[in-house]
Image: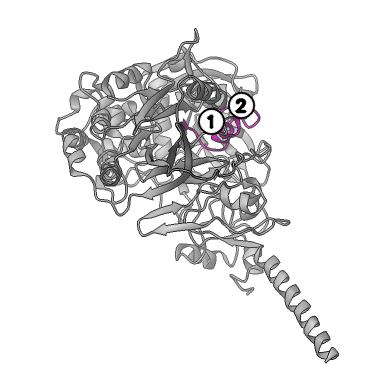
Amino acid sequence: MRQRKHVTLLLSFFLLFTTLFASMAAAQTYTVKKGDTLWRISRNHGTTVAAMQEVNQLPDVNFLRIGQVLQLPDGTVAAAAPAVKQAPTQQAADTSKPAAPIVPATKPPVAPAPVAPTPAATTEADTTTITILGTSDVHGNLYGYVYEDGKETTNNGLARIATYVNEVKKSNPHVLLIDNGDTYQGNILTDDIYRKKPEVTHPVSVAMNAMNYDAMTLGNHEFNFGLDLIKRIEKEVKFPVLGANITTKDGKSFVNPYTIVNVDGLKVGIIGVTTPNVPRWDGEKVDSLSFQHMGETVKKYAKELREVEKVDVLIASAHSGMIAEFDEDGGSDAAAKIIEMVPDLDALLVGHMHIIVKDQVGQTVVGGPRNLGRDIVRFDLTVKKEAGKATVADRKVEVIDMTDYEPDQKIRDIIKDAHEATISFIAGGGGAGDAGGSGGLFGQASADFQPENEINGIPEGKLRDTAVVDLINKVQLKATGADVSAAALFKDTSNLKKGDITYANIFDIYKFDNTLYTVKVTGKELKAYMEWSASHYNQWKEGDISISFNPDVPGYLYDMFAGVDYKIDLSKPAGERIIDVMYKGKPLLDTEELKLAVNNYRYSSGLKALKLVSANRDWESPRSIRDYLVEYIQEQKAVSPEVDNNWEIIGIDLSSPYRDEVIKLVNNGKIEVPYAKSLNVNELMQRGIIQAK
């Protein structure tokens, strides 16, 4: 009997250790579920976003696929993911219980607000559920249409958002609708037509008024066209425009810092702030303004709203991402810092980064949608009114995908004229042609300007000199008389295809409404600028059979240069790659002075912000770079792809007897596109994906 007990005891210990071992093994990976973000996964496993990105070689920390298996860094501890309730058409997270706060890894966590003991109820409390719906980064996508492609979309646009808003309002009378910014910029309708027609009400204003928005926060892209557009927006819309951290130089508010909305006898305060990095991108356009720390600003006005205005519910709308974009130390541009400084916020709407955010930090529910009207954020706050005091007793956040919603025909009807005028503008049939700029058929392309990708998802336009960027640089040199020009391939798929060239094609190869600057640079400064740009690539290592790209340096920051010949040596680390720079057939001297043509965005946020160039711009174009491209093609009537091959990548050896086999696996979808990490035959063999020959 005693022996049997010993055997049973030993067996129990064996099973216990086996279970623990299995748990430890299981904790080494995590499979991405619907609604997951890298912040949530990192937090739940006691690690950081940076560590997860490094271990998994993630090209974009903001993009995860459902079912994707992530490796957890050594030393992490498995933790149960928060419960997720799912509906057929939406992502829903029950966040009524506070979760651990999401703050940058270098910052101390914010302790959740203490939960007071529930007193014995003597009378039943009166409750109101307030639903706050939030949009962000719509970028002028009203109809649900891609003008450069000439096609309707199936899952986005403000008209689809309107359908959902109407549906919610039928079931709940206490609904607020707010926008987080980057709404009046982003396509041909907004950028090339109606921002140039101040005599008519902007179609975006028309649509938002019809949807009865309660407030809008300015985004950074609202400043792209100068302050006159913002003043115009204020006059056109029937709701307050917010920007609490934006002041004039004498300290006065530029727009409203907050608004208060009465809902069922409750006072709801809404504070709006935008990323303080606007001057980096829009330079002189905002010289008359100051942009303050978002967290400090929200703290200031939260105190006023709570103590003076006596609001019952406090909401902030911050046009920024959760993590700092530039100010890692001060967190002035990080939404996480707002919650750290104002832990009594009830809800926080974020945007700017074009990613889904859905979480709870302390008592604050946080939500952010993707761009173009792809999603809408829904906050449900249950407010309990008892003994003359109102408290938020329950809070939830959802991010609703618009895939299963049809566009609201009423919204489409009220913007129909603007939509059709834009299509007519592209085709050259008049309509909006008097808005400034040119529409219609400009010329013919004799062949495609961009070669086909050898590897799916790896743009040839980043691997070698191509006709698209050469055309942009040629036009910039012609317009400025500069010695050297710099231009980026903003979209990996940008191309001028064989056949007719319309304004849609021009927008496709140059999607931003940038102007052109010239600035004097020395040879040394130009090479420093080129080195910064070349950090877009990862360093080549033995066994690599493809070139990959640094996820911390996105493609729109990678410039290619005309007017000089040069090589990029990817066997060397970033900062040591630019070699053999030649100007007019001779090595470029560090002391030589050149005139550089560059767009206004790169000048402000790159050359000056990073102190790569000491001189100030000496000329600005009166028109956009797109206008110069149109003018050139109209003059030529027919254009052919021309490549001068003035730069090349060296220091690599992509040859391998396995290369064709591996590329076939990628192109057939058997291996993920190796954008942020090169295909390496040694690693593929270790993983058993290919076998030694």
Q: Quadrant of residue 196?
A: top left
For residue 366, above or below residue 289: below
Three-letter amino acid code at the position of disc 1: Val
Q: Which residues are magenta?
A: 318-341
Q: Residue 154 in magenta? A: no
Three-letter amino acid code at the position of disc 2: Leu
Q: For mark 1, does the 10 Å Cα neighbourhood hold few (<14), some (14 to 19), or many (20 or more) residues?
A: some
Circles 2 and 1, Cβ within 8 Å, touching? The answer is yes
- Does residue 587 appear in the picture of this structure? no
Q: Position of residue 97 (x, y in %)?
A: 54, 49
Is 100 positioned to the left or the right of 87 in the image? Answer: right
Residue ID at (64%, 73%): 692
For residue 660, above or below residue 208: below
Q: What is the number of the mark on residue 564?
A: 1
**Between 94 and 248, the one nearer to me in the picture:** 94
Q: Position of residue 611 (x, y in %)?
A: 61, 22
Q: For mark 2, does the 10 Å Cα neighbourhood hold few (<14), some (14 to 19), or many (20 or more) residues?
A: many
Colour mapping: one colour
The C terminus lies in which quarter of the figure? bottom right
